[in-house]
Image (tube, helix red, strand yellow):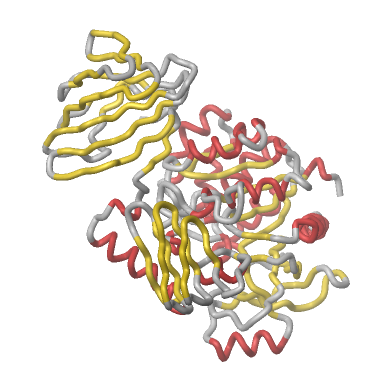
Amino acid sequence: MNSQNMYAIVLAGGSGTRLWPLSRALMPKQLLKLNGEDSLLQQTVKRLLQTVSADHIVTITNDKQQFIVKQQLAEIDPLLIENILVEPQSKNTLPAIAWGSLVIIRRDPNAIIGVFPSDHLIQNVDAFSLALQQAQNIAATGRVVTFGIQPTYAATGYGYIQAGLELEPNSAYEINRFAEKPDFETASKYLAEGNYYWNAGMFAFQAKVLLQELEQHQPAMYQALQELSDLSDELIITQVADVFSKLPNLSIDYGIMEHSKQGAVVPVDFNWNDVGSWNSYYSVEEKDADQNVSQGEVISIDTESSLLISDKGLIAAVGMKDVVIVKTDDAVLVSPRDRVQDVKKVVSELKERNSSLIEAHNTVRRPWGEYTVLEEGPCYKIKRIAVDPGQKLSLQMHKHRAEHWVVVSGRAKVQNDEDIYEIEINESTYIPCGNKHRLENPGQEQLHIIEVQTGAYLGEDDIVRFEDNYGRK
């Protein structure tokens, strides 16, 4: 099969709440560097680059994460950021995959597309590349292919795929059925029968076949997407929000795979882990002599078989066994390893409280740099703001707060209503409530300021933007 026709869609818009408190909505697990110098997204893309060219990889994310996705992809290859699609709404996997396929088929009517989550660990890259080539060959025959992970234990946290008639010796089978997450007894039965595979949410198909399946099984979605098919690339970007508002929240499994007569499963074994919980992360990481996995500043005394992660500050664990302790600068998770699936209950409780702890860390990346919340209380908030060289914040105004800025390193260019001026180290300025203002770094080194906000309401949504270099509303 001609590799020039191979494309990939990388799904990079998930929230990753099962790895709270390290994973947050603005910095979910696919963007975290959990097991090395690369994030899970970067690892996913680098695996694909063994088989797929950089200009054939389409990454789909959301508005909140798009800037850090662009930053991470640019570190690998600038070509990758030219094919980023930003969903106007999160509508599960099928709308995202269908939109990506529509964009790709406009470029190449004969395209074969692989679809891959961006938040999985795959340790055997050579085996992954071989499986992708096998799936590509099967997809070329008109099949809609899914990758079936060879199960290694009776897992109750995964859906299963039952393989049927063999299509090609040792490479692909028809799909008999998809099975929901089973109880332990059922999972043990699947493992013993030998023709059940974990459903990893990875697929391969001809773009035109996917659209045919969509027309047959989800005609309303197909018709809605056809509104985009004849538009220019520029108009698609402006019209996609209206189209997405009409689409159902639907996964490709429920929307296509469970109905398709063209489904096929390719069994694979490439040391896969979906990093779906802290316990699954513990299972794949290297352990010390006491069977502990430790990251960050950790002291463990008489502690065994535990996961100890400190993103900031010290964890001291004494006499612990089979526990998970994850510490960030604003939250600590402590749980027995066999209860970490209940992290979702913590996240639900935080949602009930309208807590910002599920949305962002104290340090938040922005396209111009980052800010860190140092302290906040009634009617005040203190931030450290870092602006990258040559970058500027939006021209903006706040309705409910005033701001005091003090430069601690670098040089700042300030627009304060009609006044434009520069301030340097140890100099300060005051931005009254209601003033249009802008902060810019005109220098060659990073600018750091301390910002003190005062006012009755200090939420991040109290921003009215008038101009922005990064396309934000």
The picture quadrant where one finds residue 56 is top right
Question: Residue 182: x, y in percent?
Answer: 54, 82
Viewer-proximal residue, 166 or 445? Answer: 445
Q: Is residue 214 visible?
A: yes
Question: Residue 282: x, y in percent?
Answer: 55, 69
Question: Residue 73: x, y in percent?
Answer: 60, 38
Viewer-proximal residue, 136 or 214? Answer: 136
Q: Is residue 195 above or below residue 313?
A: below
Q: Is residue 146 left or right of residue 235?
A: right
Question: Residue 252: x, y in percent?
Answer: 57, 60
Q: Is residue 247 visible?
A: no
Q: Quadrant of the C terminus?
A: top left
Viewer-proximal residue, 99 or 430? Answer: 430
Which residue does the image show at 69% across and 46% down from the upper left?
A: 46
Which residue does the image show at 32% across and 53% down from the upper left?
A: 330
The picture quadrant where one finds residue 450 is top left
Which residue does the image show at 26% across and 28% down from the upper left?
A: 464
Q: Is residue 471 above or below residue 218?
A: above
